Image (tube, rainbow, N blue to C red):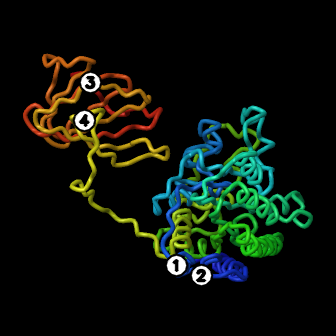
Amino acid sequence: MLHRRFLGALTVAASIASGLGVAPGAAGAAAAAPAASTHAKAPSYSRIVVFGDGLSDAGHFGRLTTNRYPPSPPFHEGRWTNGPTWVEHLARLSGWPLAVADNHAQGGATTGTYNINEPLRAALGLAADAAIQGVSAQIESATPPGTALDPKALYVVWAGGHDIGSYLEAGQPDLKAQPAAENIRAGLLRLARAGARHVLLGTLPDLGAAPGYAGTPKAAEATALTQVFNRGLGALVQPLRETGLTVTLLDAGQAFGRAGQEAAARGIRRFDEAYLPMDYVDFQRPLAPAKPLPAGREAGEFFSFWAVSASAKVHEVIGQVAYETLVGRRAPQARTRRVDTDRMPGLPLHGGPGQVNFMALNAQGAPDVARIVLRRGQVQAPYASDDGRTRLATVLKGQLGYGDGGVIDRRRERRFGPGTQLVIPSGVPFWAAARSTDVELLITILPSGSQVAVPLVEF
């Protein structure tokens, strides 16, 4: 049974969103249904570009600190949660590219230039010019004078929680003198002037119901500030359309409400507190080794992972709601499917004669998994990769002739049958041959820095 305070929060969040005064498809529809869409057909964006805070951060501080801040694990590869973020799920569902370089979101970002992690710069060992930015600064860095942005891209802007949290805890920023929604307006106008035409703008859920404020004297004020912020965002939509910028609001009430509705089916049972205690991250020693995990607790059972950070399961739901908001139909349900090898396009493998099918690509467009086919009698000339990534080759079919070296020498060639797995280091030339049968290989290209953790033998 859902925590009663949390159920109330979902109702408040939905009412905040529905009170924005914008049309369905911009603000969102009821939490249980897919959002209506103003698009005549599903949009096709060239890529996704992200500005925001820890909700959308796909590992910024992790990359700066070799995943020591936040400590990963239990945080997922520098993200402020225990799995992929919602915008990564949106990219997966939609097929719109999301490159690491296009995600400018940083944990701790306010809607202005300030980031609440700035006081930790020295403790994190970061240089004075290392970017620790709020959303306004992220947008400014991405749009220097003369910038021409891609008009076919989708620009995501989602922040505001740290503005309200900092105001409640320290009285700054002064939300009355400088409303957070005004920072968002200025940033969107800058994007529009640089050529952006499509924006997905996130509202806030009721922060008064979040762990840390729920049941405290500050809960009511947190809720009121959330309402003011969301109304401010709603008022931006029509004026910005007059500048040529189409703004679609991502309804946080709908997204978090859906996560609450699906909680039991997803195994979420805990709403009253986060999985990790607030002091799990030591802000005096932010690069300290990760502490022991809480005993007797399963991260998958918690709605929040740490502080007010949504858990990985909630991020998945947010990604689905974002997809539905933009596309106008339910996100495809994740299920096991069979690869249709008959329709896989074959490309020449390093000039041939072998054929390669790229089965999975990373965020930079480089292959992570490939299928190689050699027909009987074909020999692939020696080749060595130069990307620093180890290959794991699995023989799927036939008898593979294989040898290390830059010159084919059949005296040193070995035969390997189906099920054989070979570890091929980067920079080592090798050849492959299908002497007596057709051969199929599955090549898994390991991430840079991965260490092979299985026993190996010479051949």
- Mark 3 neighbour class, 10 Å CA radius: few under 14, some 14 to 19, many 20 or more: some
**Disc 1 to disc 3, C-alpha distance:** 53 Å
Mark 2 or mark 4, which is nearer the start of the sequence? 2
- Mark 1 neighbour class, 10 Å CA radius: few under 14, some 14 to 19, many 20 or more: many
For the residue marked with disc 4, what is the amino acid? Gln
Question: Can you tell which of label 3 and label 4 is closer to the viewer?
Answer: 3
Q: Which mark is residue 133?
A: none
Exactly how many numbered labels are in the figure? 4
Mark 2 or mark 3, which is nearer the start of the sequence? 2
Q: Is residue 215 visible?
A: no
* Residue ID at (10%, 33%): 377
Q: Which mark is residue 29?
A: 2
Residue 65 as seen in the image, left or right of residue 231: left
| Disc 3 secondary structure class | strand
| Disc 2 secondary structure class | loop
* Image marks 3 and 2: residues in contact by CB distance under 8 Å: no
Q: Which residue is mark 1?
A: 34
**Residue 312 place in picture, x, y as percent:** 54, 59
| Disc 1 secondary structure class | loop
Mark 2 or mark 1, which is nearer the start of the sequence? 2
* Image marks 1 and 2: residues in contact by CB distance under 8 Å: yes
Question: Can you tell which of label 4 and label 2 is closer to the viewer?
Answer: 2
Mark 1 or mark 4, which is nearer the start of the sequence? 1
For the residue marked with disc 1, what is the amino acid? Pro
Q: Which residue is mark 3?
A: 382
Front residue of this view, candidates 124 and 305: 124
Residue 74 as seen in the image, left or right of residue 345: right
Place residue 430 in its image quadrant. top left
